[in-house]
Image: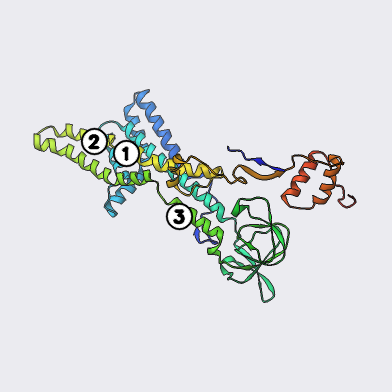
């Protein structure tokens, strides 16, 4: 046997971690509607200005683009200035956009604020996808457990299950909490915790984890960990904490932006006032140059590109089955010279397959027939692989009772 190679292409009540449920389709996002409308107005504005030569109509369309895309940016920038006494990138973007219109380049102002808004949306969307990859872990453990109390079985929320209580897990159910098998024997699928798809046998005294699947036996499990202390909850917590760790580049950009914005604003004020006051030069000319300075100094690419790249990298990896603990580790990948892979679930899919049948004096069909008679009622992955191989050869088990060795 071998395994197929894998193609490389509200609040969670269990863990008390923020959980918003199933995300709506991206095209239903209000921001997408605003982006589409802004893109349409910007395109019409460019056509009006450069093809139809209707400057007034173009300016109106550019103003509409800026108002739609720049409203939230301007609000955040002004809010940061008033309440946090901080000149943020959003404020600089707002001033730069206004400056573009004042110097007669409304097309550039509208384009800059639209692209900035689009970049912020992409960053937020990438972050949402990263959070959803963690949410998929949260869903592995059930929220309700069947507990034996006073000789009766009761369904209660996992939060209400105490250590040393006994939970009942029937075939096909997920184990709700970490514990120790107190009664019964069964094979369990631990792929959600260990990555190993082949079931392992668990009997009295063996440890089991929340989120793993009980395949065929009836188990009574003595709880050893509360819901917020299980192995699965710790994994979720570690991933969430790791995602908050910023890479050296992100830290540099944040620190740079904190000082860059006030410096640019101060320099622009100096350009607009010092030459006219000290050298009696034209105020209009130097005010225009100050606006130009604000426009060309806007660091939207620097401020947005790094976090977007990092979050996109994390979510792209998660989508392909690779869980990266945080952006700090993405930058370390370029230093890696040797990779060590866990085979199952990483290089392989964990789906078993019959490669060859050796009969030792019996035909392959005869061996497969007898094997399928034995395995046709089993849910074990090896049994399923045998049944699938027999089906490919058009071998049926019949009633599965009358056969002999």
| CA distance for labels 2 and 1 | 15 Å
Quadrant of the frame with the N terminus: top right
Q: Which mark is residue 241?
A: 3
Residue in the image at 62% along x and 52% along y:
191
The crowding category of the residue bearing disc 3, from other C-alpha atoms within 10 Å (few below 14, some 14 to 19, many at least 20), is: few
Q: Nearer the viewer, mark 3 or mark 2?
A: 3
Residue in the image at 9% along x and 37% along y:
278
For mark 2, what is the residue?
291
Could you say where residue 272 lies in the image, as x and y percent from the top left? 17, 37
| CA distance for labels 1 and 3 | 29 Å
Q: Viewer-proximal residue, 242 or 202?
A: 202
Q: Is residue 83 visible?
A: yes
Q: Are marks 3 and 2 in contact (CB under 8 Å)?
A: no
Where is 332 relative to 284, above or below?
Answer: below
Give whichever of discs 1 and 3 has the lower sequence position.
Answer: 3
Instruction: Check the image and name the residue furthest to the front.
Output: 360
For mark 1, what is the residue?
299
Residue in the image at 74% along x and 48% along y:
382
Q: Viewer-proximal residue, 104 or 300?
A: 300
Q: Viewer-proximal residue, 132 or 108?
A: 132
Where is 7 relative to 18, above or below?
Answer: above
Q: Is residue 147 left or right of residue 392?
A: left
Find numbered disc 3 in the image and state the secondary structure of the residue it sits on: helix
Could you say where residue 223 lies in the image, as x and y percent from the top left? 61, 68
Q: Nearer the viewer, mark 1 or mark 3?
A: 3
Residue in the image at 32% along x and 35% along y:
109
């Amino acid at each position: 046997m071998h395994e197929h190679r894998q193609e490389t292409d509200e609040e969670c009540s269990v863990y008390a971690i923020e959980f918003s449920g199933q995300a709506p389709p991206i095209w239903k996002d209000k921001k997408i509607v605003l982006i589409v409308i802004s893109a349409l107005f910007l395109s019409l504005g460019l056509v009006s200005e450069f093809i139809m030569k209707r400057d007034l109509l173009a300016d109106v369309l550019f103003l509409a683009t800026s108002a739609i895309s720049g409203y939230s940016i301007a609000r955040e920038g002004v809010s940061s200035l008033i309440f946090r006494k901080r000149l943020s990138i959003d404020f600089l973007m707002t001033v730069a956009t206004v400056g573009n219109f004042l110097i007669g380049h409304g097309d550039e102002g509208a384009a800059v604020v639209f692209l900035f808004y689009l970049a912020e949306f992409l960053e937020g969307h990438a972050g949402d996808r990263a959070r959803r990859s963690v949410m998929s872990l949260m869903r592995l453990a059930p929220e309700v457990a069947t507990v034996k109390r006073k000789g009766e079985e009761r369904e209660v929320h996992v939060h209400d299950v105490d250590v040393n209580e006994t939970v009942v897990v029937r075939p096909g159910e997920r184990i709700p909490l970490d514990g120790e098998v107190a009664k019964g024997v069964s094979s369990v699928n631990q792929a959600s915790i260990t990555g190993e798809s082949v079931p392992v046998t668990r009997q009295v005294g063996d440890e089991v984890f929340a989120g793993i699947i009980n395949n065929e036996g009836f188990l009574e499990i003595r709880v050893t960990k509360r819901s917020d202390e299980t192995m699965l909850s710790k994994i979720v917590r570690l991933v969430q904490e790791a995602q908050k760790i910023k890479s050296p580049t992100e830290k540099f950009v944040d620190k740079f932006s904190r000082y860059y914005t006030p410096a640019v604003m101060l320099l622009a004020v100096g350009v607009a006032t010092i030459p006219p006051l000290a050298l009696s030069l034209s105020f209009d000319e130097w005010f225009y140059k100050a606006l130009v300075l604000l426009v060309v100094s806007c660091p939207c690419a620097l401020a947005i590109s790094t976090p977007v790249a990092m979050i996109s990298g994390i979510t792209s990896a998660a989508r392909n089955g690779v869980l990266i603990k945080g952006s700090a580790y993405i930058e370390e990948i370029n230093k890696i010279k040797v990779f060590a892979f866990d085979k199952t679930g990483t290089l392989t899919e964990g789906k078993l397959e019959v490669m060859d049948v050796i009969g030792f004096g019996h035909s392959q069909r005869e061996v497969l027939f007898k094997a399928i008679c034995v395995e046709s009622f089993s849910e074990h992955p090896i049994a399923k692989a045998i049944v699938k191989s027999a089906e490919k050869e058009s071998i049926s088990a019949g009633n599965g009772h009358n056969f002999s060795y």
